[in-house]
Amino acid sequence: MEWDYYNFEALNIPKDHPARDMMATLWVDFETDVGDRPMLLRTHTSPMQIRVMEKTRPPIRVIVPGRVYRYEATDATHESMFYQVEGLAVDKNITLADLKGTLFEFARCLFGTERKARFRCDYFPFVEPGVEMAIDCLVCSGAGCRLCSGIGWIEILGAGMVHPEVLRRVGINPDTYTGFAFGMGVERVPMLRYGIDDIRLFYSNDLRFLSQF
Amino acid sequence: MKVSLKWLKEYVDIVLPPGELAKKLTMAGVEVKGIQIIGGAWTNVSIGEVVALDVHPNADRLKLVTVDLKSRRVTVVTGAPNLKIGDKVPFADVGAELIDGHTGETVKLKPAKIRGITSEGMVCSEKELGISDDHQGIMILPSEAPVGVPLAEYLGDVILDLDITPNRPDCLSVIGIAREIAALTEQALRVPEINYKELEKPVESFASVEIVEPALCPRYCASVITGVKIAPSPHWLQQRLMAYGMRPINNIVDITNYVMLEYGQPLHAFDYRKIAGERVVVRRAKDKEVLTTLDETERTLNSDMLVIADADRAVAIAGIMGGLDTEVTEATTAILVESANFDRAILRRGIAKLGLKSEASLRFEKGLSHELPLPALRRATQLILEIAGGQAAKGIWDAYPGKTERNPISLTISEVKRLLGMDIKLNSIIKTLNLLGFECQKPEVSERILVTVPYWRTDVCGSVDLVEEVSRVIGYDKIPTTMLAAPVPARRLTPEFTVREKLRNIMLSCGFQEVLTYSLTNLDLLKKLSPDQRLIGPQPLRIANPMTREQECLRTTLRANLLATLAFNQKYGTGAFRLFEIGKVFIPREGDLPEEKEELCAILNGERLGLFWRQQSGLMDFFDAKGIVEGLLCWIGNEIKFDIANDKSLHPSKRSDVLVGNVRVGIIGEVHPKVAEAFELSGTTYLIEIDLKQISSSTVSLKKYEPLPRFPSIIRDIALVIDEKVTYKQVRDAIQKFPLVSRLALFDLYRGEQIPRGKKSLAFRIVYQSQTKTLTDEQVAQVQKQILDALHHEFGAVLRK
C-alpha cells in the first residue's frame, strides 16, 4: 500500500496530470479529515525509489521486486495484480551509457548471449531522458512473427535517468549526483521464455500449471 | 492517433519509405503502432469517365458502359443502376485483384462473356475495391478526379497509427508530426500561409469576451464571420477527416475539426445570432446548472467545471463539448469561432465527473501552449472564408491574461556528456536543436548555449529535457554501452529476507508447492473462516473502486485464499495436497498505512505419499503438521514448545500454539469441520501458520554446544495410570523437574479394557544420566521412586500393573 504522494507526486506526477491515466489506480477506502483519498494500491514499484532515497544517501544500488496493482479488467495479457522489479542506481558520474550497458548485460543473462537490444525514446514523468528497451524476438530474431506482432522486437522494460526534480525532492543534489532507474514487469519474462500464453495462470494457482515448473 | 502520409506531404517532403519512416519516428519517441496502406491492392485500377451508357442487347437488367481512360476507351458490361454520363468511376483492367461483391473473396479479374458480350474489365463498387461494404452501385468519384490516373495515386494513402505519449500534445496534430519528421529527416517544414481580407468593422463591435477567473482560462481568442453559407465540405476535407476517423457534418464544423487535427488546437464555432447579448463569458458553471450538449444529452453541471456562457446561460462546456442551442446548423448565417486555452486540472475533473470525453478534451487535458490559439484561429478563419464564404470582422478578440515569458534554458556540452556518457560536439547539439525549432544563442566563446524553447513544446522546461531532445534525434543507438565503474556497495541482507528464504526452502524440501494468491479478497470468503460465518480478526481495508466484488478488500489473513485454492484444485486432482504461501497480510492502522505483516501459511490434505503402489501411506494428520513445524524451526536454537491454542478456524481439540522460547510464533491445527464445509473441501485439512516477524533476533539464538556425556545412562520404562483430564504436558513437566532425567519420551497412550473408565495409561521411556558419575541401579530406583511419589501426590498417578 502506498500514499498518493509516493506513488505519483514525488515521482513528478502531480494531481490532475495526464500521465496518471497511463496507470489506472485502485484506491483504498480511507478518508482523511479533509475528505482526501490519498491511500492507494501502488501501481508500480517506482515509489520505492523515493522510499530508498529518503533513507539512504548515495551511492545507492537497489533492486526492489514487489506486487503492483491496476484497475484493469483481466484477460490473457492483463492482470489486476502482478509483479515488477525496480532498479535504482544513484552516484556521481552515472550516465545513460551505464544504463544501456547494465540493461543490455541483464538482457543477455536472462535471454541468451545472442540477444540484441534496442533502446528507443519513451516517456515516464520520473526519468529524463526516458528509455524503452526491447530485445529482438526470441522466436523470429527480428523477422516478424506472431509473438512479436510482426514488429520483430519485444519490449522488456522502461528506464531512464532519474529526473532532477525527483532527486531534489528527496534532498539529493542533481548537480552532484545522477542516477538511472528501470522497471520491468516480471511475468513477461517467464511468458516469453516458456511460451506461457495466459497471464492469469500465475495467480489462479492451478496445480496442473504450477507443477510444470 | 492516425495520420495520413498524403496529408503530411503538404507540410514536409517524405523522403523515406513508410517502413523506415515509422522506424525513425518510433526510435525517437513517437511510436508507430501500425501502418495501413490504402490502395496497395489497386494495381490495374484507374480513373475513368463515363462517356456512353447503353442497354445490353441481351439482358434487360444489364448495361453497356463506355469508359474514357484518356489513352483509350473501353466498353464493359455492368449491372449497376447508378451510372450517368460524365460520372468519374474506378475502372479495373483484366488482371486487377478485386473483392468479389457476393462472396467477399479476392479474385483476379479475367475477361468474361456476359450474355454474349465480351467484357474486358469492369467498373467497381467500393466493396470490390475494399474501401467499404457498399455494393449498391458503382463508386462515383469526385468530379475533379483526373481521368486515366491510377486510382492508387489519387485515393491511395499510407496511414500511420501513432501512440503519442502524454507529454507531447504538440504531436496530436498533423503539423506536429510533420515537424518531427522534418527534424528527423532534415527536411524543411512548410507551415500554411495565412492571408485573408477583413472587414472594416472591428470584432469588438460584434461581441465582447469576459474571463472571470484568468487562472482557469489563460487565453481566449475569437473571430466573427458573417454571411457564411452552410453546406457540405469539399471532398478533400471530408476525406481527411474520415481518414482520421471523424465524421463530416457541415463545412463550418468540419473546418474547426480540420484545423484541430492540423494544428492540434481545438476550436469551436457558435451560431453568432444565438449568443445572447453578444457576450461571451468564460466562467465556472453554477451548481446544478443545466446544459444540453451537442449529443442531445442534458447534463447537470457543478461549480468545479468551466463553461462558456452568454448573457443568459451556459452555451458550452469549455474544452469538452459545445451546447446544442448554439450549434451551427443549415440556418446559421454568422459564426463566432473560439480558439482558447483552459486550465487542464479543472478540465480533467470535469471530464471525470461528467464521464464525457472528446477529441478536444483529449488535447486540452495534456496542457496546450498558450501561443497556439492565435495561429490556429487565423487558419480556420481563412479556410472558412475560402470554403463557406462570408466576411470576417476586423481583428481577433484576444483576451490573454495568462501571457508569460518563457525564459531561455542554459545548456552546456559538459552537461550533455555528464548525463549521456558521450561526447557530442557543440555544433551537433545546436544543429539538432535548430532542426526541432529550438533557437540557440552562443553568448560568448564558451561551451554554454542559451536555448529558446518554441511555443509548442510545453514539455521542455529544463536542461535535462534538452538533453533528451538532442539524444533522441541523434539516436540512442549512438550512445555507447558502459558498465558502472564504481565498486558495488556492500550487500547487506536484512534478517527478514534471510528468515523468509530459509523457511521457503525448508517448505519446498518438505514437498510443499508454493502458491501466490491475490492480495485482494472479499468479505464473504473471509467469513467462511469462522464456524458461525462471522468475520474473525480486524475489519479489512476496503477498496473504494473495486474492479469486482470478489476483490473488494485487502486480505487480513492468508488462510482464506489458500483454502479456496485447495478447494479449486481438489476438483482436478486427488491424492496429496501440500500447499504454502509466504506473503503479506494487511492489518489496518489508525491514520497510517496498514501494517504489512508477513506470514507463512501451509495446508495439508490427503494421503501422505499420494497413491503409492507399495503401501497405503495413510492420510496426513496433525502430527505431520507438527513434524513440519519442528523441521521449519529446528535451526532456531531455542526450544520449540507447543501449547493450548485458541483459534476459531481450527478444531477445538486439535490445535496447538507454537512457541519458541516463550514467544508465540504461530499455530497448527485441523481446519474446523464447519469451515472445511464452507470452503467445500473434501477430506480433512491441516493448517500451519507462522508469523515471520516473531522469528527475529529475540527468538533466534545461536546454538550452544553441549559436551557429550562421559558416563553411561540408564534407561527405564514406566507406565502410569492417570485421570483423563491430566495432560501429558503436566506429567512431562513434573518428571522433567528432576535433574537426573536426561531424556523423556512418551511411547504409548492406552485406553481400554485393562484401564478403569475415566483414566488412561501413559507409558514413558526415561533416560537417567549424570554428568559427574556413573549412576547405580539403586540411585536410579531412588530417583524413580521420588518421581512416582511426586506424580501420585500431584495427579493421583499410579504405576500400571
Image: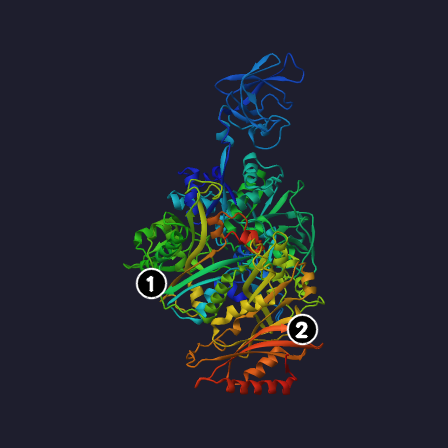
Q: Nearer the viewer, residue A80 or B503?
A: B503
Judge by depth and name the residue closer to the eye, A14 or A107: A107
The answer to whether residue B586 is seen in the rendering is: yes
Q: Residues within 10 Å of mark 2 (few under 14, many from 20)?
A: some
Q: Position of residue B660 (x, y in %)?
A: 53, 76
Q: Could you tell me residue A77's position as x and y percent?
A: 54, 49
B513 lies above or below A173:
above
Q: Residue at x 64, y 17 (%)?
A: B62
Q: Residue B124: image x %, image y %?
A: 57, 25
SS class of the residue under badge 2?
A: loop
- Location of the C terminus of chain B by quadrant is bottom right
Which amino acid type is marked by label 2?
Arg
Q: How many marks?
A: 2
Q: Is residue A134 above or below residue B789?
A: above
Residue B341 seen in the current view? no
Crowd band around label 1 with a 10 angstrom C-alpha radius: few (<14), some (14–19), many (20+): some
Q: Nearer the viewer, residue A1 or B603?
A: B603
The three-letter code of the residue at mark 1 reads Asn
- Chain under callout 1: A
Q: Secondary structure at mark 1?
A: loop
Q: Check disc 2 and report the residue beneath it.
A: B751
- Residue at numbered disc 1: A93
Residue B449, quarter of the rendered image: bottom left
For the residues labelled 1 and 2, say whether their Cβ atoms are less than 8 Å apart. Answer: no
